[in-house]
Amino acid sequence: MSSKAEKRTTAEPTATTPLPDDIAALFANTHQATPKELAALAKAADALRTDPAFLADYSKGLVVQDILRAMEEAGFNRNTLAAKLGKTRQYVGKILDEERRANFTIDTLAELSSALGVKLHVRMLPENEHMIFVRGLTITTKVEPIAEFPKPQVRSASLFGDRFESSNITPFPGPRHEQSRMSS
Amino acid sequence: MAIELIQIPGVTNQQQTRWLVRILQINGSDLVRGSLAKWERESPGDYKKIMKVLSILGQVDRIRDEKHVKKSDNPKHDKVYEIRAHRGSARLMFFYSEKTQSAVICTNSYWKAKDSKKEQDQAFETCHQLKQIYEQQS
């Protein structure tokens, strides 16, 4: 990660309204990262990108979010997914809890995607290449960093608005938009 | 008051296909990077867990698992969230920018030292206040 990319990229408008006293005091009393600490942070984050243990943990986490989303959209709970898979509820629980002993093989992922009626894509791509799903087409493309805030292509799910408002939520309730997912 | 959104050190835009994940900076200061630096130095396990959730957060519509992201259950708070280091103590608060609808904005953090809701409530409150300031000023 270059130091240039670490710099501020998204300036927001400024105003002259003062901060409330308690918030101003909080900022004044909070340790600000030094340039040395920021360099160490950037180095640590770079190291994570090539750390197999981190990559495995992160990939499992991402897959689990995909599974949870697919379950939500299919109206499945752990019991119905277990029944579809011909496995126990505990097995599904292990997968969803990202347990280390959960068996995240490609075979498992294929079974899950088949049961959930979703596509499975497992690829290994160069650092600057991403997979894009556009209207049924799967494209791999080199992607440049986003310069400024784009309009998101997918609005947050709202099918389940009420259900998730009270728990872990839909950030922007509203009509569901046509989806075109991007994934790496 | 100068409000800016800055990058999380070491987190690239390529990892943020759904949301840009940023830190709120006011008058050149922020309440996140100092904590990240401390966690990376003193609690690398927690730091990795937070970085994992941040990386996933930028790529999915929303995180559905409360062991990773929890919404404030205080009705006074306007959709503010907490990133959790699962089975750890590091916590990072954030909100979704309702103006741009494309940014996750991290505001403040805390270290969960004991099983008390007080510090969590305070952190959610701070996040809520910062969200209001951001939405009013931007």
Image (spheres, coloured by chain):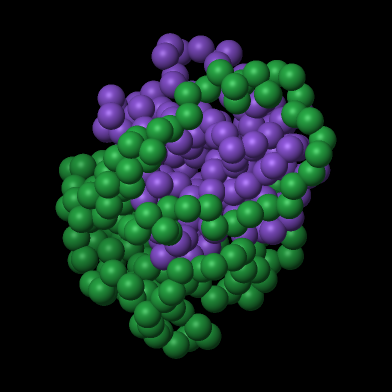
Chain colours: A green, B purple
Q: Nearer the viewer, residue B13 or B69?
A: B13
- Rendered image quadrant of residue A50: bottom left
Q: Residue at x 59, y 57 (%)?
A: A10
Question: Where in the figure is residue A48, as x and y percent of width and height?
Answer: 25, 49
Q: Is residue A146 visible?
A: yes
Q: Is residue B9 left or right of residue B126?
A: left
- Rendered image quadrant of residue B46: top left
Question: Where in the figure is residue B103, as x and y percent of width and height?
Answer: 60, 54
Question: Where in the figure is residue A79, as x and y percent of width and height?
Answer: 41, 48
Q: Is residue A139 left or right of residue B62?
A: left
Question: Where in the figure is residue B27, as x and y percent of width and height?
Answer: 64, 36
Q: Residue at x 67, y 58 (%)?
A: B101
A47 is higher (above) or lower (below) than B121? below
Q: Residue at x 48, y 65 (%)?
A: B17
Q: Residue at x 65, y 26 (%)?
A: B126
Q: Is residue B119 left or right of residue B77?
A: left
A89 is higher (above) or lower (below) than A129? above
Quarter occupied by the N terminus of chain A = bottom left
